[in-house]
Image (cartoon, rainbow, N blue to C red):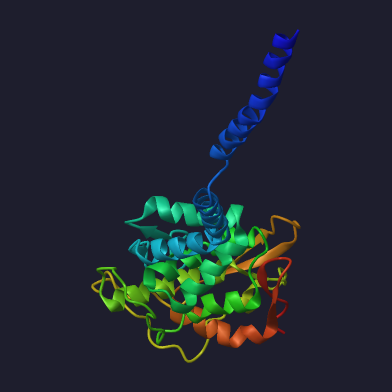
Amino acid sequence: MAKLKEQADSKVEKSPTVAHSSRRAGRRWRPSVALIVAFLGVLAVGILLGATRELRTEVAALKAINECEATAWASEDGLSDAYGLVQFRLQRAEVAAYLSLCETNPKLALRVFRQALDKGNTSGKLVAMYSAAYLTAHKQLEDSDFQRILAQLKPEVKETAPSPNPLPQGERQADLRKVAQRVVSDLTVIDDTAHPSRYEVVPAGLPPPAKGVKDPESEPRPHKVQTGEEKLQDSGQAVLYVRWSSPDVALKWWEDMAAKGRWDKDLQRFVISSAQ
C-alpha cells in the first residue's frame, strides 16, 4: 500500500509539469502581432479599393472615350438619317463598357458625360453626346445637360483637352457641330402637330450655304428646315420632330425658337409648345 501511495504522489507532483507544457503549446499557436497587423492592412486595402471603385471606373471611362479617335459619319446632308452618327476607331471595348454604364450605373455615366462635355477633347465630346440617348432612357438629363450639347453647335467652341484624333482641327470642329445638331434634333419635340409649316420657315440672317468640309468640291446644299410627326414612346403623345440642313440653320433656328420651349425632365425632351 505504501508503495502504491508513493506512485500516486509521484503522478500528482508531475502533473503541473504537463499542464505547464500544454499552456506553452497553446501560446505557440496564438497569432503574432505582426500577423494581426498584416491582416488589418489587407482588410483596409480591400475597403479602400471598394470605396474608390466608382472613381476608378469613372476615370477609366473618361480616359477611354477621350482616346477612342471618334468621328462623325461622313454624311453632309443634315436631313439624312445617317447624319451626325458617331464612329470610333480605338478603345472599342472600353467605349462599349462606358455605354453599358448608362444602363447599369446611369448616375456614374452622367458624371462622365458632363466631364467630357466640360473638359474633354473632340472624341470624348462626340461619344458623350452619342450617349445622351442612353441616359434619357433613365431620365438622367437636366436642362443644363441639354445646354451642354446645344453649346457644341456654336462654331467658336474650341477643344478643352489635347486630342489624339489625327483629323485637322477644322474637321474635328465640323464633326462636333454635326453630332450636336443630330442630338439636339433627337431631343427636341414640338407640341403643335396641327401647324408643321410654322416650324419649317428658314431663319433670316443666315450665311450662304457652305460646301462640305470633307468634300469641298461638292455643291452647297440649300438651307432647309424639315419636320415630321412621331409618337413619344412612353406616353404615345403625337409630336413633331425637326431636322435642319446644317449646323448654321440649326443654331439660328434655336435662337428664334428657344424662348418658346423648355426642358421637360419627365419626357427627357426640350418641348416647344407653339410658335404663335
At horizontal 72% and vertical 84% (from top left) the residue drawn is 276
Q: Quadrant of the N terminus?
A: top right
Tell me which corner region of the image, top left, top right, bottom left or bottom right, holds residue 136: bottom right
Residue 123: which quarter of the image?
bottom left
User: Quick check: 4 left or right of 183?
Assistant: right
Query: Does residue 98 show up?
Result: yes
Q: Is residue 116 left or right of residue 221?
A: right
Note whether residue 77 is visible. no
Q: Position of residue 62 (x, y in %)?
A: 44, 65
* Nearest the eye: 211 or 198: 211
Q: Quadrant of residue 199?
A: bottom right
Residue for point 58% across, 60% down: 51
Which of the pair 235/211 is nearer the observer?
235
Q: How many marks?
A: 0
Left or right, 50 with respect to 95, comes to right
Q: Position of residue 257 (x, y in %)?
A: 62, 84
Identity of the residue drawn at 27% across and 71% down? 218
Above or below — where is 3 with respect to 172? Answer: above
The spot of residue 263 in percent (x, y) is 68, 76
